[in-house]
Image (cartoon, rainbow, N blue to C red):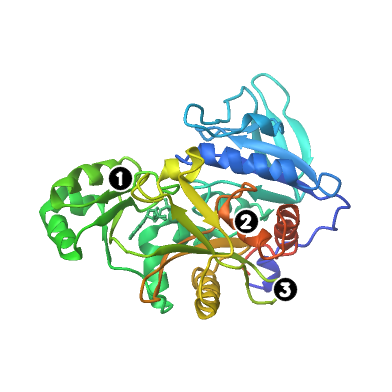
Amino acid sequence: MSDENLTAADPAPRAKPRVAVLFGGRSSEHAVSCVTAAGVLGAINKDKYDVIPIGIAKSGQWVLASGDTGQWSLSASSLPEVPPSSETVTLAEIGGEHQLIVAAPNQVPQELGTVDVVFPLLHGPFGEDGTIQGLLELSDTRYVGAGVLASAVGMDKHYMKVVFEAAGLHVGPYIAVTDRQWVKDAESVRKQVDRLGFPVFVKPARAGSSMGISKVDSLKELDAAVEEARRHDLKLVIEAGIVGREIECAVLEGRGTDSPRTSMPGEISVAAGTHEFYDFNAKYVEDDAAALSCPADLPEDAIVRVRELAAAAFDAVGAEGLSRVDFFYTNDGELIINEINTMPGFTPKSMYPQMWAASGLGYADLIDELIYLALNRKTGLR
Ligand SMILES: Nc1ncnc2c1ncn2[C@@H]1O[C@H](COP(=O)(O)OP(=O)(O)O)[C@@H](O)[C@H]1O
Ligand SMILES: [Mg+2]
């Protein structure tokens, strides 16, 4: 096969690129994605880009969404949601261009125009896990962020650790538990957990925003925690609890062949006595439950190591665009990697943009840079 078959011809650049912002989605992080989209839609430079907001309802249906950002706020009593619609949006390749088509029952489909780049502001499965990315790859549509493999690895807390370990990064002790193992031999899982030592953290392998995660202090609490996690994913990861500060670092792909850029590290501190760990409510609902501070108060050598390790994690999974890499910093100065998020929370108040703001790159400029990177990358194998 010749190289020409691998790469789509570059279209002539448009004066005002059209950006389709995709949000909502089928995962339990639907509401969080709506809030992220509100932030981006409020800040994106509309003089420079033609922006089309597309919501993905919980059913998976794509709909034309309101750009009115006020309706997408998050509180304990109201989680924002993309409403279903009689009109469905699809992305189709027509005459070599990527067109958005709106179809409604008994009506002639209407063309919305060509899309230059998709900004998939989706968290969790069917959005951050390579599935949407695969759809966009099939149609040679450019998009912001990680590709299929990096997204899938970054979503799966088991394979993420396998890849990190192979790259020489320090991960904490854990076991992965499949549906078959739990259903056929729960007793051997209990024994392995006992060997990890308590507390353990029981997690769905593929979820986010702390959904389905429990801290378990003794064997008798294990089964309930496993059942809770299995509501999100039948595959689980169970980890030894790590005592350490939660330190994060934002990574931004370099331009051209440049190395990834890293921000000043930030720190999450959960207010003592309110939450046992950084759970969903501490993350999004209760204003005072967690403090984000950036730059984190760390010795200079730790700052250097965090940034090096974050870039190494980004490269280990083959990420593109952006990622947030999260660590535990232990009392003896060890940095244990917890996870990489290939589409981290992205409201102006979220840690990823905050870390860039503290490193000299503001929110609107960050959005601009991500779109620049996406517009300038090749389609096909790269
Ligand atoms: N092994 C662990 N030891 C100590 N705390 C943990 C551990 N794993 C998770 N946590 C706590 O739970 C939170 C959520 O876990 P995480 O793996 O980051 O899931 P998510 O992908 O949902 O953010 C972390 O921010 C941390 O507060
Ligand atoms: Mg996390």
User: Residue 354 — which label?
Assistant: 2
What's the residue at 75%, 47% (across, down)? 44
Going by the numbered disc 1, the residue's amino acid type is: Ala
User: Residue 256 — which label?
Assistant: 3
Q: Position of residue 3 (x, y in %)?
A: 68, 72
Q: Position of residue 89 (x, y in %)?
A: 66, 34
Ligand 1 is in which quadrant of the figure?
bottom left
Gap between marks 2 and 3, in whole Å? 25 Å
Q: Nearer the viewer, residue 354 or 115?
A: 354
Quick one: SS at disc 1? helix
Say which of marks 3 and 1 sits in front: 1
Say which of marks 2 and 3 sits in front: 2
Q: Residues within 10 Å of mark 3 (few under 14, many from 20)?
A: few
Q: Which residue is mark 1?
A: 229
Q: Residues within 10 Å of mark 2 (few under 14, many from 20)?
A: many
Q: Is residue 37 left or right of residue 277?
A: right
User: Mark 1 or mark 2: which comes first in sequence?
Assistant: 1
